[in-house]
Image (cartoon, coloured by chain):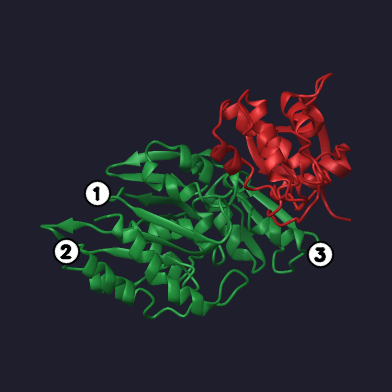
Chain colours: A green, B red
Amino acid sequence: MPVSVQTFGTIAEANRALSAGRGAHYMGGGTTLMRAINEANPDVETLIRVTDPQLSQVRLEGSAVRIGAHVTMREIARSRELAFLAPVARVIGGPQVRSAATAAGNLFAEQPYGDFAGALLACGAQVELGDGRRTSVEDVLRSPPRSIVEAILVTPPADGLAFKKITRVKPKGVSLMSISAVVPRRGGRVDNPRIVFNGMADKPARSNGAERALAGHPLSAETIARAAAAAADGFTPRDDSHASGWYRREVAGVHLSRLLSELI
Amino acid sequence: MARKKPIQFVHNGSDKAVFVDEGENLLDVLRRGVGDLTPKYGCGQGTCGACTVIIDGAPRLACLTLAETIEGQSVETVAGLAGGQLSPVQEAFMAHFAAQCGYCTSGMLMSATALLRDNPRPTRDEVVEAISGNLCRCTGYEAIIAAVMTASGQQAA
């Protein structure tokens, strides 16, 4: 069945078209949807596009950086305002994928392709929807909105973002998992940490076990060991061609420990 | 009959106007519509890089590019690299025997060309990174890396 493509000048028009049909999908960079079309996936009947150039802009908004939904990984990797996210953007796919894959698209990427979404979750980023609502990345991951995403608002973490992607093939490989960690310290103790794993659940998710082990303690080797031991608590990662769920659970703490040790 | 859409773009420096099917990818348009057979069909999944082209200066996968989105843009393929004589990257690939079966070569050449325009004197690691989206099933990577280093005027080793 041929695919129909509908192109609109504004998000408002596109939102109306999107809500009209079950087989309608919003296309950003196309790295996921074009694969589906090339496979003749019958679930993709209609592609909805928006050509508004504002969706491709990065700008400062108070202390936050506003990333338009269509900003690509290549642009993020080269943006001065988004230098803290550049190490994440640089390991999404290869150079050709980074020229097309978008910031907002990664929020809806199938596992294990949500490394950038994981980093946004760790940073506590917000999402601006085309229907005027503002919500958190956490909410978008938990329950994908019916509206098109217009932009992502993210404030650079004062204590930095630590990131590690674990792959079998280097330099470009699919994630076995990635870890994004924001570990603020107040008075020598960890305060309100956000530890996010991508690849350990059906969406990027916070490790409650690791966060509990870190919160309120100095970031020492002992604290890191406790966080590593609790890293996989509550996660039931899937088996795929890259690693088994068992393997992922076994190594999650090891990689978290290595990442956090760099922050001491 | 599927609806056709007219698009115009610049193909290797020449204006082109073609009709594309809705949902058609750029690779099919280049190969069937324009008759440029230099971008290759490998996986259709964005994994192999055989269809790499340069769109407005950035390396892209033609198989994952919705054809109608390139309206007004510039698309470069291997067919446009040699203007009377081979480009320095093509010369270096020949000198280093960097093609075995040759299926990945056009994608490798476009990734290397995009890199050297952006970064004329890359490190070896930067070359490895630049071709990381291109698979060579003959595993001839060393010769390819050496060729790109030579094309940048640096020692291959």
Residue labelled with disc 2: A218
Q: Quadrant of the N terminus of chain B?
A: bottom right
Q: CA distance from mark 1 to mark 3?
A: 51 Å
Tell me the element at label 2.
Answer: loop
Callouts 1 and 3 in the same chain: yes
Indicate which label's residue lies in the foreground, 1 or 3. 1
Residue B103, image x and y in percent?
A: 81, 46
Residue A187, image x and y in percent?
A: 10, 57
Q: Amino acid at mark 3?
A: Met
**Among the 4 quarters of the image, the one containing residue B142:** top right
**Among the 4 quarters of the image, the one containing residue B117:** top right
**Among the 4 quarters of the image, the one containing residue A249:** bottom left
Residue A168, image x and y in percent?
A: 56, 61
Q: CA distance from mark 2 to mark 1?
A: 18 Å
Q: CA distance from mark 3 to mark 2?
A: 60 Å
Tell me the element at label 1.
Answer: loop
Q: Amino acid at mark 1?
A: Ala
Q: Amino acid at mark 2?
A: Pro
Residue labelled with disc 1: A158
Q: Residue at x 82, y 40 (%)?
A: B30
- Camera-nearest residue between B32 and A262: A262
Callouts 2 and 1 in the same chain: yes
Q: Residue at x 56, y 50 (%)?
A: A171
Q: Is residue A164 left or right of residue A21?
A: left
**Disc 1 packing (10 Å; few <14; some 14–19; many ≥20):** few
Q: Tell which residue pokes out farthest to the left in this image.
A: A187
In the depicted structure, whether residue B6 falls above or below residue A153? above
Chain of the residue under the numbered disc 1 shown in the image: A
**Disc 2 packing (10 Å; few <14; some 14–19; many ≥20):** some
Tell me the element at label 3.
Answer: loop
